[in-house]
Image (cartoon, grey):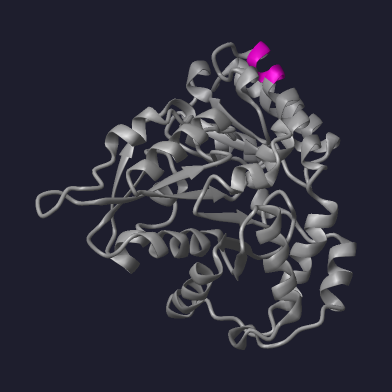
C-alpha cells in the first residue's frame, strides 16, 4: 500500500511485451510506440501524443511548452509538480512558480484565476500556465469537479493563459465519475497520463497535445535525456493496460473506501470516508497520538508498508496487486493499531 507504482506486470502484459514489434523511437520508427501515442491522444481528444519514461518528464515537457524561462506557472500548494518533481521547472527550464491553498487539493477556479498575473509587463513575473492535478495525489485521491475545471478553462482562455493537466491518475477520475476521458482532455492545452500506477505497466507516461506541440516536446524530451530506442517493448505494456486494467480501478476504489470506513469507526477524525473517492487514503494518525514515522514503522512490523506524507499523516494506496486479502490485512492490522495508539 506504499504506492500504486509498485504494481507488477501481469502474465498477459509480459506476453504482449515479449511479442512487441519495435523500432528506434528517437527516429520515430517504433510502430508500437506510435500506436500507443495515437491511441492515448485520441482517448483524450487531442491530435498527437509523446511517450515518456516518467510522469515527471511528461509534466515538465508540458510545462516547458507553455512557459519560457523567467515566466511562471501557478498550481495548488500540494501539487505534484511543486512538491514531488524536485524543483524541475526551475532547475531545467528557469521557470518560476506560485501556489494557492485548496483543502485536500480541491480545485476552486476562483483561486488560480485571482492569482494569475498574465500582463505583469516589466514589473512582475508573467503567468503563462495553470497546472491542475486530477486525481490529486497528496490531497487524498481527490477528483476535481468538472464545473470548476470548465470555469477555469473559460477564465484562462479569456486572459491568454494555458492550462496543463497532470492526469497521472486521470483514469481513476474517469472510472469514479463516469466523465469521459475526452471530456476532461479537451479542457486542457496539454495532458499527461501515467501508465505505471494503477494501470500496472512497468514504465511510462504519455503527454498529449497538438501535433506541433508534440514535435517540439520530442526535441525537449531528447534534451532532457529522455530519447529512447526500441521502447515498443514498454509501449506494448501500456496498450495492454488500456485494454485490461482501466475498468478494474473501481475495485481499488471500493477497497480503499472499505478500509477508510473501518478506520473512521475505530478512530473518529482520522479520515472522512465520504472523501475517499478513488484509491488513495490519507490517514491522520495524530488523532490517536501517533507520529507518522512511528505509525509507518509499527505498520511495517505488521507487514504493511505505508508512506508518510507529513509529520501527522500517512498515505495508503490501493492498486492492481492489493486484493481483498490485502485489504483484510490492512483492516486487521492497522485499524486496531490506530485505535489503541502508541504503547
In the rendered picture of this protein, how many numbered marks are placed on residues? 0
230 with respect to 72 (left or right): right
User: How far across and down, in percent of the image, does residue 264 sit?
Assistant: 64, 15
Residue at the image position 23 percent from the left and 51 percent from the top: 126
Quadrant of the drawing holding the C terminus: top right
Q: Residue 70 or 273: which is nearer the viewer?
A: 70
Q: Quadrant of residue 141?
A: top right
Can you say which quadrant of the picture contains the N terminus? top right
- Residue 178 position (above or below residue 39): above
**In this orientation, does residue 171 appear?**
no
Q: Given the current orientation, which residue lies at the most extreme left position?
A: 123
**Residue found at x 41% / y 59%:** 63
- Residue 183, percent across and down? 64, 42
- From what the image shows, is residue 222 above or below residue 120? below
- In the rendered image, residue 139, in percent from the top left (x then y), is placed at 51, 33
Q: Residue at x 48, y 80 (%)?
A: 222
- Answer with left or right where residue 81 lies relative to residue 146: left
In the rendered image, the vertical position of residue 334 relative to residue 73, given as above or below: above
Membership of 264 in magenta stretch: yes
Chain part drawn in magenta? 261-265
- Viewed as shown, does residue 236 lie left or right of 208? right
Q: Kindly identify the residue that appears in the image at 49 percent across and 54 percent down.
A: 189
- Is residue 83 part of the magenta span, yes or no? no
Q: Position of residue 56 (x, y in %)?
A: 50, 60
Amino acid at each position: 500500500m506504499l504506492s500504486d507504482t509498485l504494481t507488477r506486470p501481469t502474465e498477459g502484459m509480459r506476453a504482449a511485451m515479449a511479442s512487441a514489434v519495435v523500432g528506434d523511437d528517437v527516429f520515430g520508427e517504433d510502430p508500437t510506440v506510435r500506436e500507443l501515442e495515437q491511441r492515448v491522444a485520441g482517448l483524450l481528444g487531442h491530435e498527437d501524443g509523446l511517450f515518456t519514461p516518467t510522469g515527471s518528464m511528461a509534466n515538465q515537457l508540458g510545462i516547458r511548452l507553455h512557459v519560457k524561462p523567467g515566466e511562471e506557472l501557478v498550481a495548488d500548494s500540494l501539487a505534484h509538480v511543486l512538491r514531488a518533481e524536485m524543483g524541475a521547472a526551475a532547475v531545467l527550464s528557469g521557470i518560476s512558480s506560485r501556489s494557492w491553498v485548496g483543502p485536500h487539493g480541491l480545485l476552486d477556479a476562483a483561486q488560480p484565476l485571482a492569482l494569475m498575473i498574465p500582463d505583469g509587463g516589466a514589473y512582475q513575473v508573467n503567468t503563462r500556465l495553470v497546472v491542475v492535478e486530477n486525481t490529486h495525489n497528496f490531497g487524498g485521491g481527490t477528483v476535481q469537479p468538472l464545473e470548476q475545471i470548465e470555469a477555469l478553462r473559460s477564465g484562462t482562455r479569456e486572459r491568454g493563459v494555458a492550462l496543463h493537466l497532470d492526469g497521472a491518475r486521470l483514469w481513476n477520475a474517469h472510472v469514479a465519475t463516469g466523465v469521459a476521458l475526452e471530456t476532461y482532455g479537451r479542457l486542457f492545452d496539454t495532458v499527461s497520463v501515467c501508465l505505471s500506477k494503477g494501470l500496472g505497466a512497468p514504465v511510462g507516461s504519455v503527454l498529449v497535445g497538438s501535433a506541433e506541440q508534440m514535435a517540439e516536446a520530442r526535441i525537449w524530451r531528447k534534451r532532457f535525456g529522455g530519447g529512447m530506442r526500441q521502447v515498443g517493448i514498454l509501449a506494448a505494456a501500456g496498450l495492454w493496460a488500456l485494454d485490461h486494467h482501466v475498468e478494474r480501478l473501481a475495485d481499488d476504489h471500493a477497497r480503499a473506501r472499505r478500509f477508510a470506513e473501518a478506520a473512521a469507526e475505530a478512530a473518529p477524525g482520522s479520515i472522512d470516508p465520504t472523501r475517499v473517492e478513488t484509491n488513495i487514503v490519507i490517514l491522520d494518525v495524530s488523532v490517536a497520538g501517533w507520529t507518522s514515522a512511528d505509525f509507518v514503522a509499527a505498520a511495517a512490523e505488521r507487514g504493511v508498508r505505508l508512506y508518510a506524507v507529513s509529520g501527522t499523516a500517512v498515505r495508503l494506496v490501493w492498486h492492481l496487486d492489493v486484493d481483498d486479502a490485502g485489504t483484510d490485512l490492512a483492516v486487521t492490522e492497522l485499524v486496531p493499531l490506530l485505535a489503541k495508539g502508541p504503547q
